[in-house]
Image: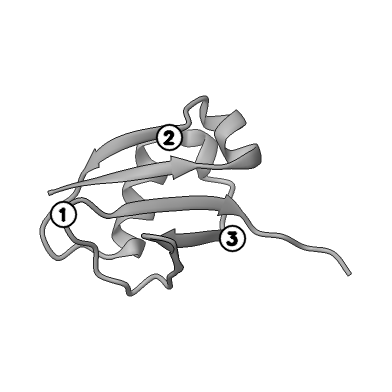
Amino acid sequence: MRVTVRYFASIREEVGLEREEVEVQEGSTVRDLLEALREARPELRGRRKLLVAVNGVRSGPERRLREGDIVALLPSVSGG
């Protein structure tokens, strides 16, 4: 099944893409997708903390993906 991954802010700059279509297996989770992206894109390997939204809703690693989902990857925000 295919999902769209959208990259934002510094992640977009590092990856060099605004979005891409990614093929994942049926039943894949956000965690599975992130592992596959880190394997395919070395620039993501150092980013252990990412904010992830699926179809506009912040989502955790166990969220199951469905055909056509839009997954947004944003850098985690820190500060105080």
Coordinates of residue 29 in the picture (x, y in percent): 27, 65
Tag 2 secondary structure: loop
Frontmost residue, 69 versus 49: 69
Q: Which residue is mark 2?
A: 41
Label 3 amino acid? Answer: Lys
Mark 1 and mark 2: Cα distance apart in space = 22 Å
Q: Which residue of the protein is positioned furthest toward the front in this rendering? A: 56
Residue under circle 1? 67
Query: Label 3 vs label 2: CA separation?
Result: 16 Å
Q: Judging from the image, what secondary structure is the residue with disc 3 in?
A: loop
Label 1 amino acid?
Glu
Q: Residue at x 16, y 54 (%)?
A: 67
- Name the front one of labels 1 and 3: 1
> What residue type is disc 2 on?
Arg
In-front residue for pair 42/77: 77
Q: Nearer the viewer, residue 70 or 40?
A: 70
Q: Position of residue 18 (x, y in %)?
A: 47, 31
Q: Earlier in the sequence, mark 1 or mark 3?
A: 3
- At label 2, counting other C-alpha atoms closer than 10 Å, the crowd grade (few under 14, some 14-19, many 20 or more) is few
